[in-house]
Every structure is written in structure tokens, then in C-alpha cells.
Amino acid sequence: MKYLDEYRNPKLARQLAHGISEITTHNWTIMEVCGGQTHAIVRFGIDSLLPGEITLLHGPGCPVCVTPVELIDKAIEIAVRPKVIFCSFGDMMRVPGTGKDLLSVKAEGADVRMVYSPFDALKMAVDNPDREIVFFAIGFETTAPANAMAVYQAKKRNIKNFSILVSHVLVPPAIEAILSSDNNRVQGFLAAGHVCAVMGYNEYIPIAGKYHVPIVVTGFEPLDILQGIYMVICQLEKGRAEVENQYSRAVKKDGNPQAIGIMNEVFRIIPRKWRGIGEMPKSGLGLKHEYSEYDAESRFGLTGYRVEESSECISGLILRGIKKPFDCEAFGKNCTPERPLGATMVSSEGACAAYYRYRRIAPNQ
Amino acid sequence: MCLAVPGQIVSIEGNDPLELIGKVSFGGTMRKVNLSCVPEALIGDYVLVHAGMAISIIDASEAELTYQYLKEIDDLATAEDEANEIS
Ligand code: SF4
């Protein structure tokens, strides 16, 4: 497919990797923020093409991973109610709450449906006026415009039997949390291309300056990722710390003004709890007061859930780039994608799940 | 999760800027996509689509620049290989 295949050429990938080794003279540690990039790096073995001086760390960039268990419990609690049709993206269906996951309550008779888009859920509300349609609105900034637009349209078209269970998180606060921690190892970032397609990259400029780290907005195909790494290493080797844009075919500096506009119309910035990391101020989105009637948590009267995380799991350290999946005792033993203990194993884009799928055996250290 | 897929706009319907809908082809597979966030998009443009919403128009000239840059690396490396073979 156009704009995909040409960025997967293996010969070019090797040349680019060679170019990276030519300019690398020091040890450098780079983090890719986005789970989609983590998945591509592990799947295509991009890290194995790189010179030994470069360490790639996998960041917190998967909304499925960082959605707290409490919210999954709430989703299940809503899904089993009579008259409800609960809609979710496919990736969220297998993530276990305290007891069950959405797929198993579906098997027990709850009406749970997988959708590709919040607009599918909204259409379901129009087609089923005697049912309550609830959409599990998870995601980063990439997904927020679509979810915001669905709520905006519901209000404008006076569709009353539609609501969303919101679990929206924001990338820049997570990057700052990583950089400001005492044991931070990250020296450069690949910023998530599709988040920036929506938001642009102005927000990252003060972060690059304050912590003196290069940040390169990067796409998702192997050649994009390699070029992003090349650009970060160039900066590191020269002592620069700027924001650059590898993914210029999709990302403008100011992002997409219409997408930002609809997000700001419907959502406001709130503190959110991230699975594996904990609560961070200003790190997520919730519905604005004017749209609170579309908030599934208040519509179904769900508040005050709290779940303790597994003490064996070190996913919080993995999400912040301090540890890697092989450092965890439970990896592949007590914890597998079928029975995940923590954040980074629950979605295919989590670092633990990607390692489990593509490289079960630890490399010789 | 944040995957967005490039597809080509085949048709556009709707006058209300907030309800612009287009048919988008993903390598032949057609889907309905909300185009409200890319109001300047035209039939034939490629857009990045995520969760049923186009979030960006792919800038063909920027794509060309990136690709040229990658080609140059390839040409350089090929020239290097050839030089090595000759010597
Ligand atoms: S392998 Fe499982 S338990 Fe260990 S860090 Fe990863 S998610 Fe947590």
C-alpha cells in the first residue's frame, strides 16, 4: 500500500542502520514513547540492527496498558446491566479486571461488541433507541478527536441513549514524569508521530530545553523509526537538544487545529491514574461540565473503586525505562499474555507482551 | 493502539463542516471516514485514519523528501560497495 510499503524496505533499513553506527561514538539510551513503535521495533528486530552503544527503552505509550484495573471493573459492571450494549475497541476486550475480562462477560451473555470507531457506537445508539449504548473511550491524544466528535454529535443530534466511559491519557506529562525522576536513564526521545499529528510538537519544545534531551517526532514504519533514531543520535553526538520532525509527511508543527478544537470543546484536562505508574496531575482528559450527561460513570453511578496492583510486577519501572521485561522474575512464568499480571503484558503493544511474542529467550547479556 | 492507516479519499459527502464524511480506500478496501478534521482534503488525497476519523492529510511533497533522503543513503552505500569491489 502507498505510504506503507516503501518504508519497509529491508535493504534501506540495513543501510540506515549502518549510517547510524558510522556516527555513533558514545553509549546512548533512547526511549520510544509509543507502544506502536515498541511493537514495530521488536517485531522487525530494529534494535538488533543497531550498534551495541545504543540502548532502546520502551516507554509508557499504550493506552490499553495504562488503563487502571478499576476502570476495567467499571466497564464490566456497566456491561452486565440489562439494556446495555457495551462497545469497545478490540484491544481492550481481553484485558482482565480484578476478576473477568469483557470477552468472558460477553460469553456469559452480556451484550459486548467490538467496534472500530466511536461513530459505530453512536450509530448503534440511533438504531437501538430502547438500549443504552456505552463506549469505552480509551486512548491518547490520537484517539481523543474521534471520541470527542462522537460526543459532540450525540449532543447536537440529541441522542440520549449514548455515553462514554472515559480513560484518556496525555503523552507530555508522562515524558516529564520520566525525565524528572531521579533514576532517569533516557537521553533522547522518539515522540509518537500520530499523537503529534493531532497536537503538533510545540508542547515538547520547553521539555527538550528544560531537561536538555533531543526529541524527534517519528513515524511507525521501520525506516521511519531508524531515521528517527539517526536524527536523535546526530543531536546527541553534537550536544544539541532540540525538537525535530522526522514524520513531516503527517505532522505539522501546530498539529491539526480542527482536531484540537473539537477536543477542547468536549474534554478538559484532569489528573488521571496510570496503571503501573500511579496518579499524575494534568495527565488525562475528562468530559467538560457541559457534556457531563454523556459520562457513563455518573450515568451508571459508579464511583470509588480501588484495586491494588500485583507486588511481583515491575511494569511501573518498565514503563519509565528503568527496567526491561527480562528483568522481571514473573516474565513468561506467572505472567503471560493469557494471564497478565501487569500493565505491560496486557496489550500486544506493551513491552512485556511484545518480548513474549517475538523473543521468548533472553539475549546473552 | 495509536495506529493510523493511510488511505485515499474516493468521495466526499455532506455540507456541514462537522459532519463531513468520505469514502476512503485502504488498498482497495472501502471505509466510511469522518473528514471533519481535514476540511481542506480533496478527492484523491491520502489521509491518515484512526478510529474512523481522518487526523491528517499526507503531504505528498514531504513524503517525497523523506523518501529521497532514504534513497540518497542507499545510493551512497551502493557507491561505497562498488568502490570496495573495484579496489
Ligand atoms: S512480565 Fe508481567 S509481571 Fe513482569 S513486569 Fe511484565 S507485566 Fe509485570
Image: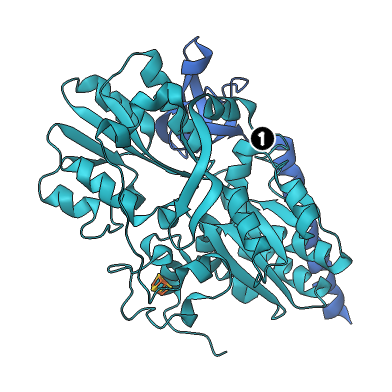
Chain colours: A cyan, B blue
Classify mark 1: helix, strand or loop. Answer: loop
Name the image quarter holding residue A167. top left
Where residue A133 sits: x, y (%)?
25, 30
Q: Which residue is mark 1?
A: A255
Q: Amino acid at mark 1?
A: Gly
Give the residue drawn at x 68%, y 59%: A189
Chain for disc number 1 = A
- Height in image: A185 above or below A279? below
Report how many numbered discs are placed on residues in the image.
Answer: 1
Disc 1 crowd, CA 10 A, few/some/many (<14, 14-19, 20+): many
| Lateral position of residue A55 relative to residue A121, left or right | right
Q: Residue furthest front?
A: A304
Q: Residue furthest top?
A: B15
| Lateral position of residue A348 relative to residue B41, left or right | left
Give the residue drawn at x 40%, y 52%: A67
Q: Is residue A245 visible?
A: no
- Height in image: B72 above or below A326? above
Where residue B76 sits: x, y (%)?
83, 64
Where residue A362 sits: x, y (%)?
48, 84
Where residue A15 sits: x, y (%)?
72, 68
* Quarter of the image where the C terminus of chain B is located: bottom right
* Quadrant hosting ligand 1: bottom left
Give the residue drawn at x 60%, y 76%: A48
Q: Residue furthest bottom?
A: A364
- Height in image: A337 above or below B10? below
